[in-house]
Amino acid sequence: MDNNFEHLFSPIKIGNFTCPNRLVNVATDSGSSFADGEISDRDIYYHSQIAKGGTGFIIVGSAQPDSKTGKSTVNCVVADDDKFIPGLTRLAESMHRYGAKCAVQLQHPGRQGAVPRYPMISASDMVIKLPWSQSHEIVYENAEALGKGVKATSIEEILNLIELFSDAAWRVKQAGFDCVQLHAAHGYLISAFMSPYLNKRNDRFGGSLENRLRFPLDIVRSIQKKCGKEFPISIRYSADEYIPGGRGMEESLEVAKIFEAAGVVLLDISECIQESPGAGFDPMYYPEGWSTFHAEAIKKVVNIPVITSHSLRSPEYCDKIIKEGKTDMVGLSRQLLADPFWGVKAKMGKVDDIRKCISCLTGCWQESHMAKKEVGCAINPSLGDESFAKMKKSETPVRLAIVGGGPAGMEAARTAAVRGHDVVLFEKTGELGGAILGCCLVPGKDKMKWYADWARRQINKMDNIKVKLNHMPILEELKQFDVVLNATGASSYVPEISGDMDSVIPFEKIMACPKVKCEYNPGNRKPAKVGEKILIWGDHYAAVDTAQFLASIGKEVTILTENHWFAERVEAIHMYVVRLRFKQQEAEALQPKTYKHPVNIIEGSTVLSVEKGKVIIQDSAFNKTILDIDTVVTCHTKPNNELFEEMKAAGLKVANVGDSVSPRNLHAAVKEGAVFAKILEGHALFNSNGVPINEIPLDVEMMLK
């Protein structure tokens, strides 16, 4: 146990304390606190799980020093009043209990606050349009995004904020935390003052580097005055803002030296401002450790520890960059959402059991902070949900049939088997994985297969799961089981049109990986042949991925959607990168691999007729256009629920999950599969909604049984 990744699991001195290993939970806003910012039980559970999992240093994200003028999310931590000290104390104790050191990150969101909507403050007056940010203006159905006005902070407000930051730091110290961190990255308030791009002031807080650093340095001095110079201070800042006129690496090296001279004991190196979100959020198109070179350069000019983060996933890579002196510590954020036990699994050599984050940004961004909700994870349904930690072996195991081996079916099978149920998993194709398998054809989206491989490995390890591939069960076969779960997913269809409907190709026949030596499918899949000019008809992930694949192999692609905006339900940062690629451009820090042809998007329109070599389309104003097209690919999808309805009519105990309920995304499928298996018992009743229920009142249970 002690010989695995010796550099990653060696101790390190930070200021006046020693961290037991080099693994850091870089600040993550879990969105779990109460509306006033008070620490909740979910906060404590979430952070204690990461500590229990072996992370040596945990930085609690986004605590607000002045909630009246800015909260980064609607339910973030707040530290602007002494009444929050007891809750913060319980939070610190929950991490110390498992040997972790911990800090609180103080962040004023400035122009990027979710609360209040107006007015928002920053270093300078500006109007912002940041549709991928939690601060984006609320755009109602069919409305136009006009941008949000932001006002410059006055000198009096700046001086007051300095005091509020240091007051909050004193509360962090009183609560028993080992360190405090200032968030000076990503375009938030301190970052905006430091940025030559965002700071257009002509007073003592703007202009020269000395003036732009005055605000954070005054906060550091005020913290030292109130908390003592021995209380450790860390700063997270962006090494490169990736925008013309923004801070680059040369200035960031000077910033590092100035912060060290001021008494900062730890530098946490990040990337970007919100105008360059690809580098900051790094969706799955970004390779592991792509920004390590920045930490390496900064480490050479300071004598204090440096943290690198951004798309770190594997213990092998993390150990290697520490060994090579490229960083002192490795920062994981989304990876610890996906698997809070990353540390102990790595330490014990259980690397294949690590559930690697796939950088999809759905549960942790699009459907949490962007939607004003608690943070979640597309591939970890137990995140923040203590009922999974309390999950027990089934008291009355059942014989469970699961029809469909996609994400919902695999997660249901895995969770049910962990609880002791006997599972038969039916999959009509020759490979488990379902809709996510086509993603390996899309350049940069191969991380999606990490989850499929992890789930398949877990299933293969379990003796109480029997997998039947190339087999679609019939009703009589399913009647032999105690319970059936329908996870048959969705499939494409062709809407009613005139002309040659039969010539329209389903996207599934395009997104069929032809690899013949795949570990999980040694068969030879033959994708459909297509012409040079292709019309992708439809929306959502099917259309986005199919368009990317075909454009990447040199096809001339046009996308047609009936919706007002194309891909409006697809995660926003991914679409930021994708839309740039459609324009034959590349997002910041990615190696250019432009398409041969730009991808054209036609919104608010539909197909009227398909004929040989041409397609007639019509927009919302009934204007008709003829397009020269060789091949039409449909990406319209509908649930495969025919078998489910047949089973219901026959009186089987059956539930429905995933895309066979409604086509959505990986997050919904995995969550629904896990929740079903978590509550499944042999004695469970199915309610009138077709869902198993347990823990019902005893007298009601007696009546119903």
Image: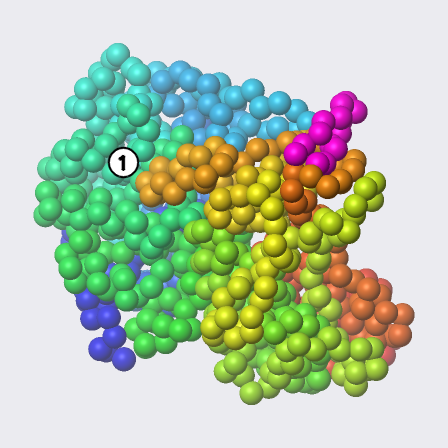
The answer to whether one can see residue 638 in this image is yes
Residue 138 lies, in percent from the top left, at 59, 29
Residue 329 lies, in percent from the top left, at 23, 56
- Residue 625 lies in the magenta-colored region: yes
Q: Give the magenta part as a residue range.
A: 614-628
- Report the residue that reaches farthest toward the bottom: 463
Name the kind of residue labelled 1 in the image: Asp
**Quadrant in which the N terminus is drawn:** bottom left
- Residue 39 lies in the magenta-colored region: no
Q: Is residue 348 above or below residue 132?
A: below
The crowd level at tag 1 (other Cα within 10 Å; few <14, some 14-19, many 20+) is: many
Residue 192: quarter of image: top left
Q: Is residue 362 above or below residue 44?
A: above
Residue drawn at the location 65% of the way across and 85% of the way down: 422
In this picture, residue 202 sits left or right of residue 263: right
Specify the principal SS of the magenta part. strand
Residue 277 lies, in percent from the top left, at 41, 37
- Residue located beneath label 1 in the image: 240
- Report the residue that reaches farthest toward the front: 612
